[in-house]
Amino acid sequence: MLTCKEFLTELNAFLDEETDALLRMQLEKHINECPNCWVVVDTCKKTMKVFKGMEPQPIPREVEGRLMEALRRKMEARRTGES
């Protein structure tokens, strides 16, 4: 049986329906047996449904700049082995 950590590692692929049939069956079994992971999947699916119905909104330049800088720092920290 999968652990919750293993399940969460595969969550994006599961939601995007990119897992092979065997792994998908294991993930679905885990969801049916784990109420916490079921809530995560249910919440993600509902959130995706809401956002798919929305029009894209532009990000203000200053917010985009801060976001890109934070991502750059995070990537640099990973490269150097920091968290």
Image: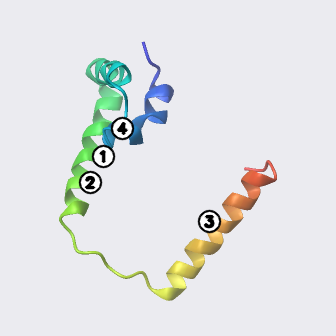
The residue carrying mark 3 is: 71
Q: Residues within 10 Å of mark 1 (few under 14, many from 20)?
A: some
Q: Where residue 34 sits: x, y (%)?
A: 33, 22
* Residues at marks 2 and 1 touching, judged by CB atoms closer than 8 Å: yes
The residue carrying mark 4 is: 18
* Residues at marks 3 and 2 touching, judged by CB atoms closer than 8 Å: no
Q: Where residue 74 sits: x, y (%)?
A: 67, 60
| Nearer to me, 20 or 34 | 20
Of mark 4 and mark 3, the one earlier in the sequence is 4
Q: Residue furthest bottom?
A: 61
Instruction: Give the label on residue 48, or none.
Output: 2
Q: Residues within 10 Å of mark 3 (few under 14, many from 20)?
A: few
* Residues at marks 4 and 3 touching, judged by CB atoms closer than 8 Å: no
The residue carrying mark 1 is: 44
Q: Where residue 58 sits: x, y (%)?
A: 37, 82
Is 74 on the left or on the right of 40, as rendered?
right
Question: What residue is rendered at 58% in x and 81% in y?
Answer: 65
Residue type at mark 3? Leu
Q: Residues within 10 Å of mark 4 (few under 14, many from 20)?
A: few
Give the CA separation, mark 2 to mark 1: 6 Å
Give the CA separation, mark 3 to mark 2: 23 Å
Residue type at mark 4? Glu
Instruction: State the SS at label 1.
Output: helix
Give the CA separation, mark 1 to mark 3: 23 Å
Question: What residue is rendered at 22% in x and 49% in y?
Answer: 46
Is 8 on the left or on the right of 15, as rendered?
right
Residue type at mark 2? Met
